[in-house]
Image (cartoon, rainbow, N blue to C red):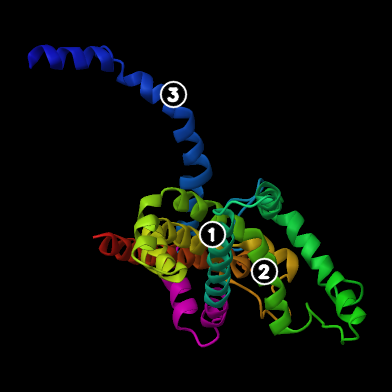
Amino acid sequence: MAEAIKAQKKQVGPAGTGWVVWVFLAPAILAMGLTVFYPLIKGIWFSFTDIDQYSMGNAFEAPSYQFIGLENYKEILFSGDSDLLRVLGQTVLWTVVNVSFHFGLGLMFALLLNHGFKVRSLFRLLLMVPWAVPAYVAAFSWRWMFNGDYGLFNQILQNFHMEPINWLSKPFWAMTAAIATNVWLGYPFMMVSILAGLKTIPGALYEAAMLDGASRFQQFRHITLPMLRPVSLSVILLGFVWTFNMFPVIYLVTKGGPYGSTEILATYAYREAFESWNLAEASTYGVIILSILIVLSTIYSRMTKETRV
């Protein structure tokens, strides 16, 4: 036993080399500290102050903002003039609809690609195109297609002798346009992840089910869906977090309009910070967004563990 322990220590490396690990980790830790942890702590601190464009300070003037405690949170959470509930409702609607379409389309295309056919490689390449396009490029392209005067979709409607739609001028159609853009951008991730999960399901399970006389739908319900549950829960959680904070699509396609009807919490916080220069309130919204995602992620993780057990 002693000889085995010594041999294992020799494989791990000589004593005193632990500092080497920290040397290699130091650049990553430093980068994370400067780009993630420092801004996070700074933003949380700002949410307890009255900082704005006048009190933030500059190269010639020292900061003059003051600590005000929970006043910003009271104003946002309990004031009758707060837009929190309206924007939060729009954010939840935006997130649920998008993630539902992402998962539904991703599952459908993954099942299709999991079966062999002649042009599967070409079809898979075409389905992966949205994932390769940068979000801001896709947002500008879709905004052009939804243009009320010369956009592609209204041209198609007019060719079928139908009335054009003011896509970006009506609240319902503006939200529809933003959701369509984000669905096109987001389903490839779900498709690839689910397809990878499908490849791990043993074929013997389907063979046994066929011998027992199970139909295709019964195989899908009792084999495919249960076996995909771990992958599905993970990608839905990731999709929820990403979509909840999907700033570029909303901002570049609808700019939060018309009349704030497509605003979500991320774009609302941005406007408060860089258009109204209300940095304290914007920081407070950022902390609220982070808190919501932490709570939902914790609940979802516990549900996932219970499901697996």
Q: Of the two numbered discs 2 and 3 on the same chain, state the one appearing first in sequence.
A: 3
Q: Return the residue nearer the eye: 266 or 113.
A: 113
Q: How far from the left and from the top, in percent, is residue 16? A: 27, 14
Q: Are marks 2 and 1 in contact (CB under 8 Å)?
A: no
Q: Of the two numbered discs 2 and 1 on the same chain, state the one appearing first in sequence.
A: 1
Viewed as shown, does residue 149 lie left or right of 78?
Answer: right
Q: Which residues are magenta?
A: 66-91
Q: Return the residue nearer the eye: 233 or 192.
A: 192
Q: Residue at x 86, y 80 (%)?
A: 157
Q: Amino acid at mark 1?
A: Leu
Q: Is residue 245 magenta?
A: no
Q: How far from the left and from the top, in percent, is residue 80? A: 51, 88
Q: How far from the left and from the top, in percent, is residue 290? A: 45, 62
Q: Residue at x 87, y 75 (%)?
A: 156
Q: Is residue 111 above or below residue 1?
A: below
Which residue is under mark 3? 24
Q: Is residue 162 above or below residue 136?
A: below
Using a 10 Å C-alpha cutoff, classify the residue at mark 2 as few (fewer than 14 neighbours), some (14 to 19) or many (20 or more): some
Q: Which mark is residue 276?
A: 2
Q: Return the residue nearer the eye: 167 or 62.
A: 167
Residue 49 visible in the snapshot: no
- Name the chief secondary structure element in magenta: helix
Q: Amino acid at mark 2?
A: Ser
Which residue is under mark 1? 111
What whole-number distance in Å separates the C-alpha atoms at marks 2 and 3? 43 Å
Which numbered mark, 2 or 1, is in the foreground of this view?
1
